[in-house]
Image (cartoon, rainbow, N blue to C red):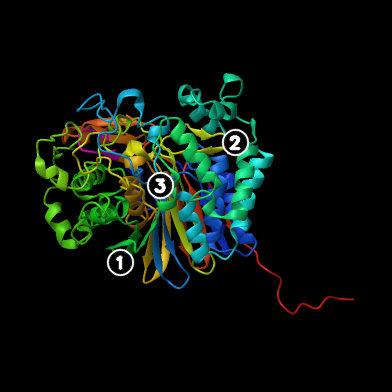
Amino acid sequence: MHNRHWQALAASHFEVEKQPATGVRGMVVTNHPLGSAAGAQMLAGGGNAIDAAIAALFALTVVEPMMVGIFGAGMSTIRLANGEHHFINNYATAPATATPDMYRPIADTWPDYQVVEGRENEVGALAIGVPGTLKGWCEALNAYGSLSLDDVLQPAIRYARRGYRATQYLHELISKEAADIALFEDTARLYLPGGRPLAPGARVVQSDYASTLETLAQEGPELLYGGALGQAAADHIQATGGLITTSDLAAFSTVHTQPVRGTYRGHDIIGPAPPSAGGVHIVQMLNVIEAFDVRGMGFGTTQGIHLLAETLKIGFEDRRIHTGDPAFVEVPVAMLTSKEYAEEKRHLIDMQSAREVDTGYSNTARSNTARSNMAPSNAAPSNMAHGAETPHTTTLTTADADGNIVAATHTLHSAFGSKVMVPGTGMLLNNTMNIFDPHPGLANSVAPGKRMTSSMSPVIVERDGKPVFALGSVGGTRIFPSVFQAIVNIIDHGMSPQEAVEAPRLWTLGEEVELEAGMHDDVLAALKSRGHRLAPLNIIGGGMGMIHFGGQCMTGASCWRADGTPIGIGGGMARPGIRFAV
C-alpha cells in the first residue's frame, strides 16, 4: 500500500498484486495482454482510441474466445476529443419467431427458477440471440475511428493464423465447461484436442477463424448481416434447432443514444443508458451515499461496509422494478438519477441495523397482473443468486493523447456462449437468450426483437469537462456494484488506480452480503451483530480495468481477477527540423 493514502485503509488489509502502466501518448487496458498489445499497435501507428478499442476487441475474440465474439453482445461509452459523448448499444435481441413460452421452466422458485427442460436457454442453438457486436464495432470505427477495418483486424488475423499460447485462465474455463463443449464437434476439436482441455502454454491456432476475419476485412460487416457468413450461421442454427434466420440478421440495428449522466462530489458520471442497469443505478447509488461522510467512515470499516451493503439493496430493488428495454417498457431515468429521489430512498438506511428486503428472486408472484406492465424482474440465473457466478464477459478502456476515450464491455454471455461453432468459420455463437426470464407473462419474458437487460457498466468520470478516469468490469449482476465501489475508492478514499481496481469488494441482493477476503474479524463480527448474513468468497465479479488521467500522464491498471494488462505509449516523433551532420 502507498503510505500517502488515508489511514482508514488499515481496516482492510490487502496488497496490490499487479503494477500499473503509465503513458503520455495513449493507454490500452484489456483483460488479456495480447488484446492490449493489439490496441497499443494502433496507437503506435497513429490511430486513435476508437481504433485501439476495436482492434483490441477483435483480438480478444481470438485470445479470449470464452468471453467475447463477433456473434455476441455489448455496449460502448465513448468520449471524443471535442468533449462529445456517445453511447452505442449493440446488445443482442430475441429472434423474430421467439415467443414467451418457447422454453419449459422446471420450477417457479429458486434455485431452479432459470433452468428449463434440456437447458435449451443455456446450451445449443435455441439459446442464441441475434448478435450485435460486429455491427456495433464497425459502426463505431466508421463514425469515430481513423483507420480502416482491414487495419484494425490485422492483429486478430495474425493471432488466429499464427496462434497464441493458452493461459492458465483459458485452461481453467475450458475445464469447467468441458462437458458442454464436448457436445459440439467443431468447438471440441479446437478446445478439447484429444478429449482433454488445452493445456496452459499450448499453442492455439484458429485457421478457419483467421480466414473468416480476412474475408471480413475485405467485405465489411455485411458479411454477417446479409452475406455469406450470416447465411452459414443461420443455416447451421436452423439445422440444429434454433430460430435465427438471415432476415433476423439483416434486420438487426444498434441503438445510438446519449449516455446517462449524474454528478458525485463535483464529478460528472457518464455511463450506459437502459437497457443497461449500469449507468442509471450507479448514479442512483452515488446520489444516495453523497450525503454520508464516506471518506470519514474509512474503507473496510463496519460503517463503510454497512453503508455500501444497504445502498446496494436500494439499487437492486429499483433495478428489479424499473430497468428494462426502453423499447418495451418505460424506464424513469430522470427520476432514478435525481438527487430528490435519492433523498427519499436514503431514509431506508438505518446505520445501526441491516434492512430485510424482498429481493424478488424467491418467487414469481405472477398473479400480480400489473407485473406485466412493469420493467423486468431481471431474475438472475441460479448461479448468480447463489454466489457462484463466473465472469463471462470482457471489458476494455482505451485513451489517446487527444482526449478520445472508449470504455466498452462485450460478451458471449456464458463462457464460450452457447458452445455452438459454425462449421468452417471458427465463429462461436452467443447464448444471450439465457438472460431472459423463461417464464411467460413477465416484463423480462422473451419477446420478438427484445433486448435483454444488462449490468454492463462502461463508465467515464470527468470534472470540469476534463476526464478524470474511465473504467469497466465484468461479472454479470456484480458489474455495476463493482464499478460503483471503484468510483467510491477513487473519489472518497483517495486510492491509486491500482488499489481502486484490486480492493476487496462486496455484493448483495439483500439476503446475504458477499465479501472478498481482507476484512478484519472484528469488522465481520460487528456486521453480523447488525443483522447481516455474511458469505465469504474468493472473488466477486471479475476483471476490472481503469485509466486515470493526471496532467498529461495516463495511468492504466488491471486487477488480479483476470489476465488484464495495461499498456501505455510514451515517446514520440523526432523533433522537426533536425539537421544531420555530414
Q: Position of residue 346 (x, y in %)?
A: 15, 53
Q: Which residue is mark 1?
A: 266
How many badges with numbers are in the image?
3
Q: Assess disc 2: are there few (<14), some (14-19) or many (≥20) residues with their C-alpha within 10 Å of its C-alpha.
A: few
Please say whether residue 399 is one of the residues in the magenta stretch. no
In this view, the mark in front (3 or 1): 3
Check the picture and name the quadrant holding the C terminus: bottom right
Q: From this viewpoint, which residue is outermost toward the right?
A: 582
Which residue shows up at 29% across the image and 35% down it? 514
Tell me if 213 is positioned left or right of 555 in this view. right
Please say whether residue 508 is one of the residues in the magenta stretch. yes
Disc assigned to residue 424: 2
Residue 478 is drawn in which quadrant? Answer: top left
Q: Which residues are magenta?
A: 507-513
Q: Position of residue 547 (x, y in %)?
A: 47, 56
Q: Which residue is mark 3?
A: 248
Q: Amino acid at mark 3?
A: Asp
Task: In the rendered view, tell whether residue 464 sits above or below residue 478.
Answer: below
Q: Amino acid at mark 2?
A: Gly
Q: Position of residue 557 (x, y in %)?
A: 49, 50
Indicate which disc, 3 or 2, sits on the residue closer to the N terminus: 3
